[in-house]
Image (tube, rainbow, N blue to C red):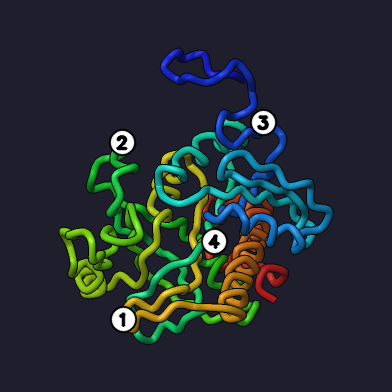
Amino acid sequence: MPIADPRVALPQTDRQYHIDLGPGQLSEYILLPGDPDRTARIAPLLDDPDPEHRHREFASVSGTYKGLRVSVVSTGIGTDNVEIALAEILAITHRPTFIRIGSCGVLRDDIALGDLVITSGAVRLEATTSYFVHDGYPAVADYAAVAALVEAAARLGHPAHVGLTATAPGFYGAQGRPIPQLPIRYPDLAAEMAAQRVINFEMEASALLVLATLAGCRAGVVCTAYAQRNSGQFVVGEQKERAERACIETGLEALLILSQMEARMREAGAVHWRPSLWASEVAP
């Protein structure tokens, strides 16, 4: 239903203003890439995908993955765009499960380009979430989503690492990258984050994790290492394509595993997921 509060300047329609989607158009299992063009590359991995829908940077498609109805909605770059996407998705779904798939720069030498990084929690270097929660509020991934992502990566044979992420509000100065034409305030930021055992930089995770927690939804994050910050190397060509594919496959498989975990919880009458509920069909 349209929002009656006059402070929310939205048209009188049930279609959301930015993503241009309405009730019933999204699954409750949602993959969130940043890049809108990535949505078109995910669609062929789905059975019977709907036509892609795009409005601004928000590209969406729904289809079936191994029998599970899933949706893909791109968020664009940055936590401000994530806030828009999440607010509007929450308005037209019941209690969705989110997996963000993205790219990142890694801060540890033992993480190779193309490896996956699964976020356990995020350092909130951005300001978007401060409009929702206290500055000391943690951005924490749902523990079952982390477990599902770890299982998915292992099942598919993709090298993965688990740890803390730093979510920055920009790509250059906000991540301590020098800019010849501009001064930056924190040139040692990458080293400081590494000293605090943060293993990667990206630009969306903390907003997803905080807002999903507030909404009572499960959310997880997996990124593929596009940049090695210590050496300055970036993925290119076929290596980049393989790295993106690994991240997409892991995100889709994790959604499937989460749906199986939730089914097992219902069967057992459990409120929380625990390893003893891990059924053979979830971990073959």
Q: Tag 1 or tag 4, which sits nearer the N-term?
A: 4
Judging by the rendered image, the residue that carries numbered circle 1 is: 230
Q: Secondary structure at mark 1?
A: loop
First reached walking from the N terminus: tag 3 or tag 1:
3
The image shows residue 258 at horizontal and vertical percentages of: 62, 59
- Of tags 3 and 1, the one toward the viewer is 1
Nearer to us in this view, 281 or 58: 58
Q: Tell me which residue sits at (68%, 31%) in the image.
A: 23
Between the C-alphas of marks 3 and 1, the distance is: 44 Å
> In what element is the residue under mark 3?
loop
Q: In the rendered image of this protein, does residue 266 appear above or below residue 189?
A: above
Q: Residue at x 42, y 40 (%)?
A: 214
Task: Check contact, mark 4 vs mark 2: CB within 8 A.
Answer: no
Left or right? Give the position of 46 relative to 265. right
* Circle 1/circle 2 CB separation < 8 Å: no
Q: Residues within 10 Å of mark 3 (few under 14, many from 20)?
A: some
**Residue that extends furthest to the front in the rendered view of this protein:** 181
Which kind of residue does numbered mark 1 sit on?
Asn
Name the amino acid type tagged 2: Tyr
Which residue corresponds to mark 4?
101
Quadrant placement of the N terminus: top right
Rounded to the nearest whole Å, what is the CA distance between mark 4 and mark 3?
23 Å
Image coordinates of residue 53 in percent, x first then y, are 70, 42
Q: Which mark is residue 131?
A: 2
Numbered circle sitting on residue 58: none
